[in-house]
Image (spheres, helix red, strand yellow):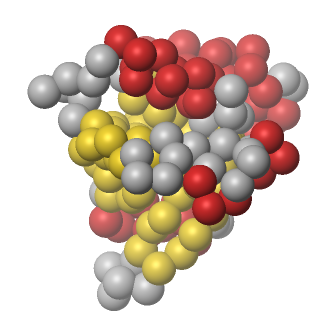
Amino acid sequence: MSVSKEIQAELDELVSGLMTVILSTADVNGMPNASYTPYVAHAGAYFILVSGLAKHTSNLLQTGRCHALFIADEKGTANPFARKRLSYACLVSEVDREDPRSDVILDEMAERFGPTIQMLRSLPDFRLMKLQPGEGTFVRGFGQAIPIPARV
């Protein structure tokens, strides 16, 4: 199953218009944690650069899973109950600093977020993580929850 070109265009517009993703993680005991982080989209996945000191980072490393939420800004939404949003269940893996993709993705982050990335990439506790989207849901508004198939 795939989504229509119209729906895909809406998904792309929503995700490309945002700079951060909201993460829902849990530790190995199931204790939940909500957070957010800047991201870049690359080759069908989302990449985040997160501190090893952050709770979400240890949760991601321990479980290898999260839920990612991309949600339209409240200011541009007529009804807060019907904000456009896209959520995915994601498999998570760390991208080793020696992996050739690491520099490519970090360079994309630097282009998008500026000089802060150069400083963060030099810190040894920061980890580059890949969020591989699984199945998701796109909510266009009231009564418009559209299943989104996992990306292959």
Question: 133 or 108: nearer the eye?
Answer: 133
Question: 110 or 75: nearer the eye?
Answer: 75
Q: Is residue 59 above or below residue 19?
A: below
Q: Is residue 144 above or below residue 99?
A: below
Question: 23 or 78: nearer the eye?
Answer: 78
Image quadrant in which the N terminus is located: top left
Q: Position of residue 52 (x, y in %)?
A: 59, 59
Q: Is residue 11 visible?
A: yes
Q: Position of residue 53 (x, y in %)?
A: 64, 66
Question: 72 or 99: nearer the eye?
Answer: 72
Q: Residue at x 40, y 77 (%)?
A: 27
Q: Residue at x 62, y 50 (%)?
A: 83
Q: How many marks?
A: 0
Q: Is residue 17 left or right of residue 75?
A: left
Q: Position of residue 60 (x, y in %)?
A: 42, 60
Q: Is residue 95 left or right of residue 14?
A: left
Q: Residue at x 47, y 79 (%)?
A: 32
Q: Quadrant of residue 80?
A: bottom right
Q: Is residue 52 visible?
A: no
Q: Quadrant of residue 5?
A: top left
Q: Position of residue 113 (x, y in %)?
A: 79, 27
Q: Is residue 150 above or below residue 57?
A: above
Q: Quadrant of residue 25?
A: bottom left
Q: Residue at x 22, y 35 (%)?
A: 149
| View extreme (left): residue | 1
Image quadrant in which the C terminus is located: top left
| View extreme (front): residue | 143
